[in-house]
């Protein structure tokens, strides 16, 4: 029995099927590469979008105890004051006025035009004592009455005797505020939305 020296010629249909089989792995590879590129682009868009509207900071030190502790991690809403007004009691993050390389976290006590004072460890705004349920210990030093300029707020740390704040370097310019602290995501046993008790006082005057 003789064996043909050349393979039989393929029909047009067989030739198309063979070409399709050869191209299928290549098309699958192109499809996977396209999906990977799309995933990377989406991840980058989400990353930049999230960074545009929020920031993540690590609390360094004890100046905001007992509300925040050293090495707490907090998410900051950068757009909070684009959409709403700053309130007494808000916890805000901002570049430290004496060293903008550092970010500080403090609580807003006085708004523009307010009169702020501390007597016997108690804070008074516009002559009215304010309740501060977030404090563990009051300030040990008094503060003579200070009038907050327009465009500024007066900020204090919750741990009054261990805080560098407006008592030391003056009122904080509102336009310097990075945003409002809204969520603690570490440590895991302290995860949750950050409470901002509104400190209601009479208008200045």
Image: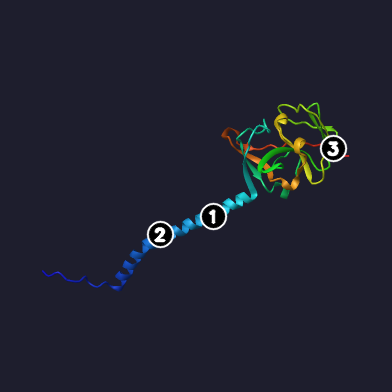
Residue 147 seen in render? yes
Q: CA distance from mark 3 to mark 1?
A: 49 Å
**Numbered badge on residue 42:** 1
Neighbourhood count class around disc 2 (C-alpha, 10 Å): few under 14, some 14–19, many 20 upward: few
Which is more toward the observer, 140 or 2? 140
Q: CA distance from mark 3 to mark 2?
A: 69 Å
Q: Position of residue 92 (x, y in %)?
A: 70, 41
Q: Position of residue 157 (x, y in %)?
A: 71, 34
Asked whether, in this view, residue 17 is left or right of residue 150, the answer is: left
Above or below, comparing residue 52 to residue 131 in the picture: below
Q: Secondary structure under badge 1?
A: helix
Q: Position of residue 103 (x, y in %)?
A: 66, 42
Residues at marks 3 and 2 touching, judged by CB atoms closer than 8 Å = no
| Between discs 1 and 2, the one toward the N terminus | 2
* Circle 2 residue: 29
| Between discs 3 and 1, the one toward the N terminus | 1
Neighbourhood count class around disc 1 (C-alpha, 10 Å): few under 14, some 14–19, many 20 upward: few
**Residue at the extreme right:** 205
Q: Quadrant of the C terminus?
A: top right
Asked whether, in this view, residue 32 is left or right of residue 50, the answer is: left
Name the image quarter holding residue 58. top right
Which is more toward the observer, 192 or 180? 180
Instruction: Indicate how the structure is coloured in the image.
Output: rainbow
* Circle 3 residue: 202
Residue 198 seen in render? no
Q: Quadrant of the N terminus?
A: bottom left
**Numbered badge on residue 135:** none
Residue drawn at x 76%, y 45% is: 173
Above or below, comparing residue 79 to residue 192 in the picture: below
């Amino acid at each position: 029995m003789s064996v043909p020296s050349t393979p039989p010629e393929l029909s047009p249909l067989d030739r198309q099927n063979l070409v399709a089989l050869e191209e299928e792995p290549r098309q699958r590879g192109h499809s996977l590469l396209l999906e990977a590129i799309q995933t990377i682009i989406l991840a980058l868009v989400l990353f930049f979008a999230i960074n545009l509207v929020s920031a993540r900071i690590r609390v360094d030190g004890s100046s905001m105890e007992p509300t925040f502790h050293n090495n707490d991690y907090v998410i900051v809403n950068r757009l909070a004051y684009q959409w709403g007004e700053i309130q007494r009691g808000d916890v805000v993050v901002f570049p430290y006025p004496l060293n903008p390389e550092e970010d500080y976290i403090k609580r807003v006590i006085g708004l523009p035009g307010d009169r702020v004072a501390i007597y016997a460890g108690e804070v008074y705004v516009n002559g009215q004592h304010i309740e501060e349920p977030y404090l563990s210990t009051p300030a040990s030093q008094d503060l003579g009455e200070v009038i907050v300029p327009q465009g500024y707020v007066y900020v204090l740390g919750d741990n009054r005797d261990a805080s560098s704040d407006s008592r030391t370097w003056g009122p904080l310019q509102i336009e310097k505020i990075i945003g409002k602290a809204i969520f603690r995501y570490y440590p895991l046993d302290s995860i949750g939305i950050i409470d901002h008790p509104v400190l209601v006082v009479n208008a200045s005057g």
